[in-house]
Amino acid sequence: QVQLVESGGGLVQPGGSLRLSCAASGSFFSINAMDWHRQAPGKEREFVATISTGGSTSYLDSVKGRFTISRDNAKNTVYLQMNSLKPEDTAVYYCRIHVQFRSRRGEYNYWGQGTQVTVSS
C-alpha cells in the first residue's frame, strides 16, 4: 500500500516560519498531484496548496505570497514552506497525494496523518 510520513510542525511566533515535509512510500507506479490541506479547530478541512507533476502550483488566496509548495520527485516528498505565519494559520496540516498503480486503473488519493502547526506569542 501507500504510507505518508509528515514532519515539521510545531509552535512558532507570529511572523515566524516553518517547513513541513511529507514523504511517500509504497507500491505505487507514479505520483501525480501532491497537496496540502489544513483543518482548524471547529472548522472544516480546507485546501491550502497543490503542485502538479510538472511543478505547476495553486494556492489558497490567504496564503499566497507567504507559503510555497515544492516537491522532490526523486524522494517522493512534498514540502510546504510557510513564512510570515499568522495566528489564523493555526491548524492540523495534512498532505495528500494522488497515485497510480501498475495493477489497476484510475487514480487513488492518500492522506498523511497530520501535523500540528500552532502560531502564537
Image (spheres, helix red, strand yellow):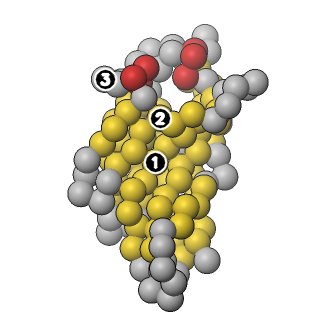
In front: label 3 or label 1: 1
Instruction: Kindly identify the residue that appears in the image at 45 percent across and 86 percent down.
Output: 102
Circle 2 crowding by C-alpha within 10 Å: few under 14, some 14–19, many from 20: many
Q: Which amino acid does label 1 sit on?
A: Asp
Asked whether disc 3 touches disc 2, contact meaning CB atoms under 8 Å apart, the reply is no
Q: In which quarter of the image is residue 10?
A: top right
Q: Position of residue 21 (x, y in %)?
A: 48, 49
Quick one: which residue is furthest to the top in this view?
Answer: 121
Task: Kindly state the secondary structure of the residue where label 3 is placed.
Answer: loop
Which quadrant: the C terminus?
top right
| Circle 1 residues within 10 Å: few <14, some 14–19, many ≥20 | many
Could you tell me how many numbered marks the image carries? 3
Distance of mark 3 from mark 1, alpha carbons? 17 Å
* Earlier residue among tags 1 and 2: 1
Residue of label 3: 65
How far apart marks 3 and 2 lie (CA) works out to 12 Å
CA distance for labels 1 and 2? 7 Å
Please say whether residue 49 is visible from this viewpoint: yes
Is residue 6 shown above or below 67? below
Q: Which quarter of the rendering shows the N terminus? A: bottom right
What type is the residue that disc 3 sits on? Gly
Relative horizontal placement of residue 82, taking residue 68 as reference (left or right): right
Binning the other alpha carbons within 10 Å of mark 3 as few (below 14), some (14 to 19) or many (20 upward) gives few
Judging by the rendered image, the residue that carries numbered circle 2 is 48
Q: Earlier in the sequence, mark 3 or mark 2?
A: 2
In the image, is residue 48 above or below residue 24?
A: above
